[in-house]
Amino acid sequence: MHVELRKIAKCFGALRANDAITLTVPASTILGILGENGAGKSTLMKIFSGFYSPDSGEILLDGKAVRISSPADAIRQGIGMLHQDPLDFPPLRVLDDFILGRRGGLIPNRRGAAKEFKELALRFDFSIDPDVYVDTLTVGERQQLEILRLLWLGARVLILDEPTTGISLPQKEKLFATLKKLAAEGMTIIFVSHKLEDVEALCTQAAVLRQGVLVGEMLPPFQTKDLIEMMFGKEVPLAPKLKLEPGKSVLAAKHIALDGIRLQIKGVDLEVRAGEVIGLAGMEGSGQALFLGACAGLAQPTEGSFCLDEDEHDMTGRSHHDFRREGVAYLPAARLEQALVAGLSLTEHFILSEGMKGLFIDRRKSEELAASRIALYNIKGRPDSAVESLSGGNQQRALLALMRSPLKLILVEHPTRGLDIESTIYVWGKLKERCAQGTAIVFISADLDEVLQYSDRVMVFFAGRVSPPLDSGKLSVEELGRLIGGKGWEALQGATEHA
């Protein structure tokens, strides 16, 4: 399908999210849309997929002007959108989720739908059981389910918003192979991302947005330096890797065993020292999130102990609130669902996090505090901004601004998931400032380059197995990837035994 967006504009109050954007995307094209967080990428795609109505401009499909009034209207016209967090229903079985949105009678033809599901899955080499529950699937499998559903509903244009966030390398390779196959069959693919390497590996055309404006387009071979300068209006150098001398013991995990829904892990030993950064790597569901939660008192070990400080203050069996009182902060990956409160402003979040004394809230003092933190953490928002109105990068900055000082330990899931290069460097700069003050950090990331760039030591999780802490300076991305995929563990075990 040939797509044209002509002079699309959208404002939210004083914010001009899209400013007269014009794009042409021929059939069989894979268009990469790049831009910093808050550049207007998601807004533009939500207009195209019917979630928002534009203030002005028009959309043409195969040369015909159309009006897209809702997501259901968009799919009827052949436009499907795969969101960063798949819009599925975890309590449902895969087949029930698959048939949602299909027009027809009150009683769906489950047998026919199951047959078509299996045929589509086989066509793209997806291994998804239609009878399992959606909440048992990985993020990559949920993406595959949503792609199959959109194709079944008749999508001829597929929009993907940050689809490689949180999926493993093999899942990304399969996703890219699927998108290339669809484009070869005449579909139009729009791939929204902040990852230059993904756009360079996949796309046949690239467009860059900055502050709501289309600032440039490019065809392969892509020039990384030029794309970065278009995205940010300047060069963005990577921060040098800094290694601080570790201090006293902050956390000691001894012989930890944990029971998860889908796996068990046993015999985990880790001592974290002040100023140190520990990266936890592994495919989603390999146990790293379970272990990180246990370090915060969110899951209880079936064996072993957690101790804080050099005096080995035993925290085994204690609640998350006890860990927080002892100076342990936990930042989950699901910012809006688990860390921030939708509907509340930034000022109200600072009131809650600071625990202001007295029966009455000093609104003026609270707003001054919010304004100072917004300036300090370079958050693009106002004290009265609702947190859900912020971009992903600004929500992450808000989470950092909400953390109290001092802290012994910060536990963070995917600290830069969905963030652009500049925001990633900024977030890690703030985390490293905490390290310089004596705070230790343990984090999870699916980005192997990030794990090696910012960790002092790395622990690898694979199907319930956990490596000893490994020196990140002696690991390559390839070696780390092999361990995550289950290869090389015998040599690792032998090296540990001789150590």
Image: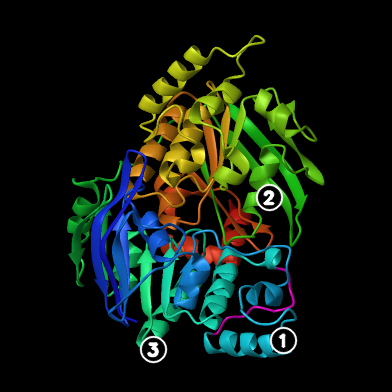
Relative to 306, is 18 above or below? below
**Rendered view: 161 above or below 65:** above
Q: Quadrant of the N terminus?
A: bottom left
Q: Position of residue 128 (x, y in %)?
A: 64, 78
**Camera-nearest label, 1 or 3:** 1
Q: Secondary structure at mark 1?
A: loop
Mark 1 Cα-neighbour bin, 10 Å: few <14, some 14–19, many ≥20? few
* Label 1, label 2: how far apart the Cα atoms are: 39 Å
SS label for mark 2: helix
* Callout 3 secondary element: loop
Residue designated by label 2: 290
Sequence order check, earlier mark of 1 and 3: 1
Q: Earlier in the sequence, mark 3 or mark 2?
A: 3
Q: Which residues are magenta?
A: 125-133
Residue type for callout 2: Leu
Q: Quadrant of residue 298?
A: top right
Image coordinates for residue 401, horizontal then vertical, percent: 47, 29
User: Residue at label 1?
Assistant: 109
Mark 1: which amino acid?
Answer: Asn
Q: CA distance from mark 3 to mark 2?
A: 41 Å
Residue 413: horizontal and vertical position, in percent? 55, 46
Q: Which mark is residue 185?
A: 3
Closer to us: mark 3 or mark 2? 3
